[in-house]
Image: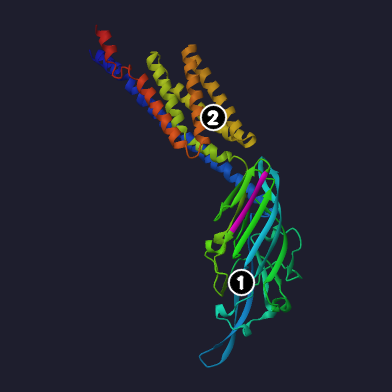
Amino acid sequence: METQQTQTFWQRNSIMIKSMIVGFLIIVLLIPAALIQDLVRERQERQEQVIAEVSSKWANGQKITGPFLVVPYVTTQTDEKGKTYSVKHNAYFLPEQLSINGKLEPEIRKRSIYKVVLYKSDLQISGHFAPLNFTALGIDPSTVQWNDVHFCVGLSDNRGIAEQLQLNFRDQSVEMNPDLPVNAVTTTGANALLSQSSLAEAGNHSFNLKLKLNGSERLFFTPVGKQTQVQLQSTYNNASFTGNFLPRNSANNEKGFNAQWNISHFTRNIPQSWKDDKADIDSSAFGVELLQGIDSYSKTMRTVKYSLLFVALTFCLFFFIEVLQKRNVHPLQYVLVGFALCVFYTLLLSISEYTGFVMAYIIASLATIGLITAYIQSVFGKVGITAVFFAFLAALYGMIYVLIQLQDGSLLFGSIGLFVILALVMYFSRKIDWYGARKVQAQNS
């Protein structure tokens, strides 16, 4: 009698117990998925290390700050004992007009399996400073040290200077030196000591500088001019304009890019002249980044985050076929299918480092779909069931690929996809005898 009651209990609850086992296996398979995420991060960090290593031997991303004038002056102070002493200060002046025209020549370097985008730039920097107004700053012009005025250009990495810098200031040629007299604006760059005769002339102080600068991945500028105009062109065809200002006109296609910025001093919170205090010029930087095509690591990471959806839906279909076909499938067989789904991510990660994300996704998904459908054929031995499983996996991998490629529309597309999947699950599960009541009634009758 007890044996019969026990059999009745298992018959009534076998489907529920099996579904709980399947749910537990889904949770367990999240562990290898988490380990794969760690592997993706590790490979991405390795790529960043290689890029940093190659860039350190060439030049890092460059940011040009300036040009600006550093004008020292002296004030007289009195101490507690009534003795006077001199204190040196600095006044800073930004150009009235700044124009930068440049060409950027990209160069791809390879280290192991990784690529690094380097560049050589040829920049023509010109403009003029307005007559220096010391009265507006509360400075007595007689205290200015005219023999120590410097023309400065800030550069984030001096290793990128490709040749000697020669400044033309009011038609006088001055050789520039690789340092800065003060660090109030920026810490590295080049400067030129200006002659008193050039500064004593009336009118605007015009300048012209040819700068050949090497760098990697990005080139930024600061809008120090009261009116700043920058025009940059290159043959590199995968650029992103970023920073505080977007170009007024730009073209970015397979032949390269061309961009023009036109920035007024009204759009930045920087005075044209100040004394002593530091000015946050770098916060207004803008420029271009040279991208390396599709970032396979970020896309692989996004794909791994859908691992729960992959495993849950595949196991759900496996479970429905098992129940509807009245075939007993061992939990180990579920585990094998789950491991095949996890191996997809390692294939995707490793292949994408050589072929790119799109080709790697196609190869890895076809290999995984082929492996699982072949296994399903051996388990159930029915071509119809195998075809259903093949179509399901192909649709699932296709949907995930579209989600990865989409940006703003991924939420809408994903929500619609989940709604359709839920509707299909509800439809095909409507005839399942969850409590085994029909089986028990059939045996009792």
- Observer-nearest of 129 and 177: 129
Bounds of the magenta segment:
256-262
Instruction: Please report whichever mark, 2 or 1, sits nearer to the chain's N-terminal start.
Output: 1
Identify the amino acid type marked 2: Phe
Residue 410 shows which numbered tag?
Answer: none
Task: State the residue at coordinates (73%, 71%).
Answer: 170
Packing grade of label 1 (10 A; few <14, some 14-19, many >=20) is: many
Quadrant that contains the C terminus: top left
Main secondary structure of the magenta stretch: strand
Identify which residue is drawn at 61% across, 69% down: 94
Q: Where does the image place residue 243, in percent across and percent down from the top left?
A: 56, 54
Q: Residue furthest bottom?
A: 82
CA gap between label 2 and label 1 equals 60 Å
The residue pinned by badge 2 equals 344
Element marked by disc 1 = strand
Pick the front one: 176 or 332? 176
Label 1 belongs to which residue? 93
In the image, is residue 401 above or below residue 135? Answer: above
Q: Amino acid at mark 1?
A: Phe
In the depicted structure, whether residue 83 falls above or below residue 125: below
Q: Is 432 or 245 nearer to us in this picture?
A: 245
Q: Position of residue 219 (x, y in %)?
A: 64, 54
